[in-house]
Amino acid sequence: MIKNEEILVVHDDAALPFGKPKLKIKGGAGGHKGISSIIYYLQSENFMRLKIGIGREKPLKKYVLSQLKEEEKNFLFETLFPFLKKGVKVLFNEGVNKAMNFINSFREDEHE
């Protein structure tokens, strides 16, 4: 059986700037309906979340469902996702605290 604290949920976060990753161990939903649903079904907030910033555009619902710009796609696939792949390896090999230090220290200007 998988323990809640072994679950990693990857999701968008409008409170973070576009492309900014953040790894958290637990917490509330922060208004995210998908996370609210997961909390409801697990009956726990004790799971890891890998948040990827999408920025806050208005209206949010239309923005979340819109297509990415070509430069945004390039950034995600060429810069951010390879970085996060390393971060997930750190998570599985060295633990959540080292992974949080690695992932949460991401700076776009260091990866251009």
Image (cartoon, helix red, strand yellow):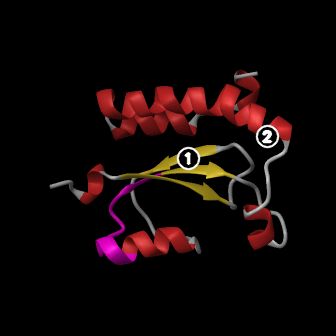
**Mark 2 residue crowding within 10 angstroms, few (<14) / some (14–19) / many (20+):** few
Q: Is residue 10 above or below residue 33?
A: above
Q: Residue at x 67, y 44 (%)?
A: 20
- Residue 32 image position (x, y, % from top left): 57, 70
Quadrant occupied by the C terminus: top right
In this picture, residue 83 sits left or right of residue 7: right
The answer to which of marks 2 and 1 sits earlier in the sequence is 1
> With 13 as the anchor, is 94 left or right in this view?
left
Which amino acid, mark 1? Answer: Lys
Separation (CA) of disc 2 from disc 1: 18 Å
Q: Is 73 one of the magenta-colored residues?
A: no
Q: Which residue is mark 2?
A: 72
Residue at the spot x=36%, y=68% of the render?
A: 45
Asked whether the viewer can see residue 43, the reply is yes
Relative to 63, is 68 above or below?
A: above
Give the magenta-colored segment's residue range.
40-49
Amino acid type, mark 2: Glu
Q: Where the N terminus falls, by quadrant?
A: bottom left
Callouts 2 and 1 close, C-beta under 8 Å: no
Q: Residue at x 63, y 58 (%)?
A: 13
* Label 2: element kind: helix
Q: How many circles with numbers are drawn on the protein?
A: 2
- The one nearer the camera, 77 or 15, is 77
Image location of residue 34, percent across then percent down: 52, 69
For label 1, the residue is 22
- Is residue 46 inside the magenta stretch? yes
Residue placed at 74% from the left, 48% from the top?
A: 18
Which label number is shown at residue 76? Answer: none
